[in-house]
């Protein structure tokens, strides 16, 4: 009976979202911004109520023995609520991509052909503990003219439903269909499977969370999925580089925030600079508590490095652990990245323009950098204003997905009586 109820619930939500998407796709930029700013003000006014509902999730999480790190991600602190308010204001200030004519050309017969940017339609978002994703995702989807169905983790159900009520209140008050933003109100696991089967109504699924969640979604979805399995990012320290610069970049890439997908997990060092670079770099890492797992040559230079196993190459540690390999050439470094990378972020530190250009052209990743930290693969850092996720597959977007990536283009044509002969 529960299974039938969940199936009916998800079918109803999907159909309502599709109906709402058609209406939301054509509302004005001013109205979308008005909804976003209204939501921001309502969040500020409902802080105590939100935190009261959030405490229910936190208390249940403590009873279940969830880790302190997990509970930290789950908490709607004053700072988190302030960041959600700021995020809504920032999205409202961004240019609206919908309706932009990206290109136009005239055919020999006089037909004027163009491409115009339009919303994707209905987006299904499946994510884990962070309830602030509810607001971030809703804001981006709405600004890009999409309807969204949000399926948060069961550990944040009270928080997410409280946030949903604020969003829907802001939509209703401004005359926008409240079904444009829906939060799945059940913790039943079957809700995810049912959501992934609604290919008639939902245009894209975006999962955010651990590799296990994303693989489950990909394997069970009938709908196109934005894929981002893991972030195995590398810095390649080239021969003849500015070694001081390389030390600062690699330190930032690994240590600034080791538990995120754009942190460096592997460091490749050209054999010509390894004897001088690795001791300096190693000491910086050692002081910061980074455990180095190195190849034979790395261990010869750094006595405190642990010998790397085959499993260490290509591992997303998400911790203060780093795989280090000395390579004989840039070709060997690029071959290593091709084998062990995850198409997320790759960087080269070099003084050689031709080698930098070759690295940019030949390395396959959603962001390739020259003389900069991997930590820059982020929508805000790259100037997108905000992002809904990072795609490591090439369809239909590659890299951080901002407002423009939550749209597609359609062809338009203006004629003057032309017929095809």
Image: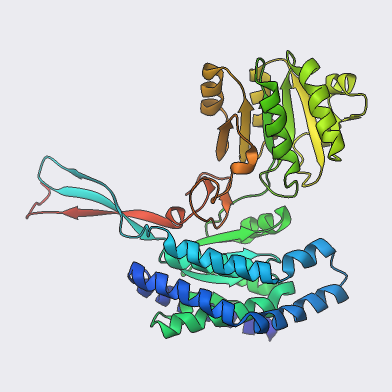
At 82% from the left edge and 34% from the top edge, which residue is drawn?
285
Q: Which quarter of the rendering shows the N terminus?
A: bottom right
Instruction: Report if residue 300 is visible in the image.
Output: yes
| Relative to 177, 13 lies left or right | right
Left or right? Give the position of 192 relative to 382.
Answer: right
- Residue toward you, 300 or 225: 300
Residue at 77% x, 47% y is 318
Compared across the picture, whether 336 is left or right of 283 comes to left
In the displayed structure, 25 sits above or below 3; it is: above
Q: Which quarter of the figure has residue 84?
A: bottom right
Residue 3 position in % (x across, y down): 67, 80
Where residue 198 appears, x then y in whole percent?
53, 69
Rendered location of residue 244, percent (x, y): 70, 25
Q: Is residue 14 visible?
A: no
- Please tell me which residue is depicted at 6% across the width and 55% down the height of the picture: 417
**Front residue (pair 179, 7):** 179
Residue closest to the eye, 143 or 363: 143
């Amino acid at each position: 009976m529960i299974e039938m109820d969940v199936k009916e619930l998800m079918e109803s939500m999907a159909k309502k979202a599709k109906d709402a998407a058609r209406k939301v796709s054509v509302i004005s930029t001013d109205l979308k911004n008005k909804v976003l700013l209204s939501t921001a003000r309502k969040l500020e006014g409902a802080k105590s109520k939100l935190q009261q509902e959030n405490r229910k999730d936190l208390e249940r999480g403590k009873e279940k023995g969830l880790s302190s790190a997990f509970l930290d991600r789950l908490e709607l602190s004053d700072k988190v609520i302030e960041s959600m308010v700021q995020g809504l204001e920032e999205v409202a200030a961004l240019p609206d991509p919908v309706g932009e004519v990206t290109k136009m050309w005239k055919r020999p017969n006089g037909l004027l052909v163009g491409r115009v940017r339009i919303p994707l339609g209905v987006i299904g978002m499946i994510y884990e503990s962070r309830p602030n994703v509810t607001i971030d995702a809703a804001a981006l989807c709405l600004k890009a003219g999409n309807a969204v169905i949000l399926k948060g983790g069961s550990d944040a159900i009270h928080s997410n439903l409280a946030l949903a009520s604020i969003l829907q209140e802001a939509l209703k008050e401004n005359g926008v269909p409240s079904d444009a933003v829906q939060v799945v109100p059940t913790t039943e696991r079957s809700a995810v499977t049912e959501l992934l089967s609604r290919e008639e109504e939902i245009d894209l699924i975006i999962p955010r969370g651990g590799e296990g969640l994303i693989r489950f979604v990909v394997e069970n979805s009938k709908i196109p999925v934005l894929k981002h399995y893991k972030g195995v990012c590398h810095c390649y320290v080239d021969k003849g580089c500015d070694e001081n610069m390389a030390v600062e970049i690699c330190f930032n890439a690994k240590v600034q925030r080791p538990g995120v997908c754009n942190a460096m997990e592997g460091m490749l060092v050209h054999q010509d600079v390894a004897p001088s670079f690795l001791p300096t770099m190693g000491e910086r890492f050692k002081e910061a508590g980074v455990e180095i797992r190195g190849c034979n040559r790395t261990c010869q230079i750094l006595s405190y490095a642990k010998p790397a196993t085959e499993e260490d190459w290509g591992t997303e540690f998400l911790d203060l652990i780093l795989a280090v390999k000395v390579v004989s050439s840039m070709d060997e470094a690029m071959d290593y990245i091709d084998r062990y990378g995850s198409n997320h972020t790759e960087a080269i530190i070099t003084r050689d323009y031709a080698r930098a250009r070759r690295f940019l052209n030949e390395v396959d990743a959603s962001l390739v950098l020259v003389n900069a930290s991997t930590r820059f693969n982020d929508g805000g850092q790259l100037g997108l204003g905000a992002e809904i996720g990072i795609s490591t597959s090439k369809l239909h977007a590659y890299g951080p997905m901002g407002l423009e990536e939550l749209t597609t283009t359609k062809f338009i044509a203006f004629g003057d009586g032309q017929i095809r002969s």
